[in-house]
Amino acid sequence: MTAMVPSILPPLLLIGPLAVALFLLTLPWFRDSLPEAFATDKGSVTLLERIHLGSVGYVFLLSVAALIQVLSSGAISAFGDWLFVDALGAVFMMLIGVVGLMTGLYSIAYIRHDLESGAIDAGKVRIYYGFFSLFLFTMLLAVTANNIIMMWAAIEATTLGSAFLVGLYGQKSSLEAAWKYVIICTVGVAFGLYGTVLVFSNAADVLADPHQAVLWTALVGHAAELDPMLVKLAFVFALIGFGTKAGIFPMHAWLPDAHSEAPSPVSGLLSGVLLKCALLIVIRFYVITVGTVGTGFPQMLLLTLGLLSVGVSSLLFFVQQDLKRKLAYSSIENVGLIVVALGVGGPLGIAAALLHAINHSVTKALFFCSAGNVLMKYGTRDLRAVKGVLRVAPATGLLMMGCALALAGFPPFNIFVSEFMVFMAGLNEGYGWIMALCALFLCITIAGLVKIVADSVLGKSPETMAKGDVGWKALAPLGVLAVLVLTLGFAVPQPLSTLVQQATAVVMNGDSRPVVAAPWQTYDRQTYDTARAGGQLVTGSLSQTEISK
Amino acid sequence: MNGFLIVNGLSGLLIVSSLLVTLAGNPANSARFYALQSFILVMLFVALAGATGSGELYLWSFTALLTKVILVPAIMYRAFRRLSDPTIGSGAVMPTALSIVGAAVALILCFVVASKVTLPAADAIKPALAVSLALFFIGLACIVAQRNILKQVFGYCLMENGSHLTLALLAPNAPELVEIGIATDAIFAVVVMAALGSRIFDTLHTLDARQLTSLKG
């Protein structure tokens, strides 16, 4: 294990959103002693928005700063290694930073609309922004935790932090969704706690210093000395526990309810980021388990659950008529595909899983926010009533069409690149039939997505519907996300491919550098040689300058 | 060895008290029985601290006394006392006798699993270890086989007590902060669940999980 560089950035990153959350949520207790602007709920909405923007902007900037430090000097840590950011954690930290910022910006227009339409009152606006920051904080804590008990506590805290966001509208259905979310996830995560406790107690027995036994980095270093039976048991518990939060079948029951009932920006955050944070914890336990019992046992479990998730969710996706529920099932499917890629293993499989996590995050956040625009415009999520979005709201229609094509895995959108890598890895490792099944299920999804485009985006708009798109404030953040979706689809940028390579090395617990690139990207000589030496199918070719050398 | 005998003996009482929590007629009574169970757990921690000579465990016993015996039951008692939904009775899906038989079967299965653990720390306390695992699953059953959403919260509390006990048994020297982290999280979980449960009751006038079925498919 290489030494970690002490850094002030991880605690700084956490303290901002936490402070904002505590301030906003406890505001009524000391409102009287604050300036005039806070005095009334109505007058303070603008102020609340500014504080919220400050919080999401802060998280974004700090995560970029932390990322730069990780890329230049390796893993950084703080508080006696209790907090750390390695390349693996940095991938997920960036997701929180980027998707948090975009859904945060989008929230402004969305929540204003809800306020004006009377769906929520001014007091709820404060609750919303307060819990939004708290939710960001808990997710950041989960990805920066090196202490495995803290990892568990943070994942548990993400549920508690976001439950009120899910139930924000206070209607029968949203309260029901919030309750299911809390109960299923806390119970699921209780399994995670049991798994964590098993690993920790086991390590506390083996390691000389029990204070070290709680650190993930120390556990990975001593994984070979742990008791195989206990570690297997712990992995099963952790996979059930954190897998519940990640939305893996059959523990996914909370997900469609929570995703569909939450305000759309939160749906984007849940699907885009929260599921991935839980996956990160699964990956961390996977690394320990591989160190103790080898790859066979964990990969078998991951492949089984991943394939089941893809299969079941693709069918449910197809028959679903509620737009946001449909998207929720698509999230389960994509998480399933990520889990399949992890189960396939090898450097390429791991890199494919990570890249797909990133790509799905951006795309799904965009899709949920576009669905939010539809909801603002049509007032319903029922696809039988949503017709002709392109005519009614051209920009939103275009965004939805792009999202649907991207999710279907068409080039030149980002999902194509990572799905291609997943299939390449699967075939490379000899899982032909599993990949064939996945491809079959993906076809069902494509059919469902084409149906969305054909019936709802195109189609004939209702005659009573007023033409005109939602405001620019709602469209601008989505535009940025759309640019990301396209850019990542043309080529994987250099810093990102380096990050994914380094993160893969963390998961493989050694130095292995898979090629992370779109199939049509050309390689320099070194990458080309690594790819061939690593047994990767080389789809790209050498660049002209390299050939002429 | 005497200390470990007390530990194993007390763990038996945990099973009895968990059944009382599960089968109590209303949530307020469950809160009382939960306090009782947590008190037994604290005594068990003290006995274990004496037997293993672990200073950390004495601290644990103290924080557990504050949080599990006093704070959490008080929160639940206060929140749940005013909420009652006579239409669902005890809310149990299974008959009482079957619940008890189920708990016994779970306990036997957990003994089988615990007997396979090879950690040296586990040698003297295998019965208690089996109980801790059983407690976890009784908690799970309490959630699955309960219609009263407030009593489902107690299921979570039982699961949490189970994992807490496993931790204490297998790693008596765990840093105090680990224990505090788990305890704080559990408090927040109970607060959030109680708040949500109360809102559901205020809005929908029911505590019946079977009424919460408008979202499907």
Image: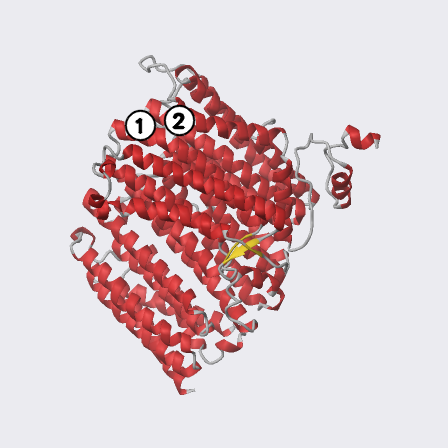
Q: Position of residue A178 (x, y in %)?
A: 32, 44
Image quadrant occupied by the C terminus of chain A = top right
Between A71 and A135, the one nearer to me in the picture: A71
Q: Which residue is mark 1?
A: A113
Disc 1 is placed on an element classified as helix
The subunit letter for the residue under badge 1 reads A
Residue B146's quadrant in the figure? bottom left
- Residue marked by disc 2: A474
The picture places residue A504, in percent across and down from the top left corner, at: 63, 48
**Residue A188 placed where, x, y %?**
41, 54
Scheme of colours in the image: secondary structure
Rendered location of residue A328, percent (x, y): 43, 37
Task: Inspect this view and state whether residue B147 appears.
Answer: no
Q: Quadrant of residue B105?
A: bottom left
In the image, what residue type sits under mark 2?
Ala
Q: Residues within 10 Å of mark 2 (few under 14, many from 20)?
A: many
Report how far apart the C-alphas of labels 1 and 2 lie in the structure: 10 Å
* Image mark for residue A151: none
Which residue sits furthest right?
A549
* Quarter occupied by residue A354: top right
Marked residue chain, label 2? A
Q: Is residue B55 placed above or below A25 in the rendered structure? A: below
**Image position of A278 with respect to B156: above or below:** above
Q: Amino acid at mark 1?
A: His
Please state, as top left, top right, bottom left or bottom right, where the N terminus of chain A lies in the image. Answer: bottom right
Which label's residue is closer to the chain start, 1 or 2?
A: 1
Marks 1 & 2, CB-CB < 8 Å contact? yes
**In this view, which residue lies farthest toward the bottom?**
B2
- Residue at image x 58%, y 53%? A75
Compared across the picture, whether B214 is left or right of A283 comes to: left
Q: Residue at x 39, y 35 (%)?
A: A265
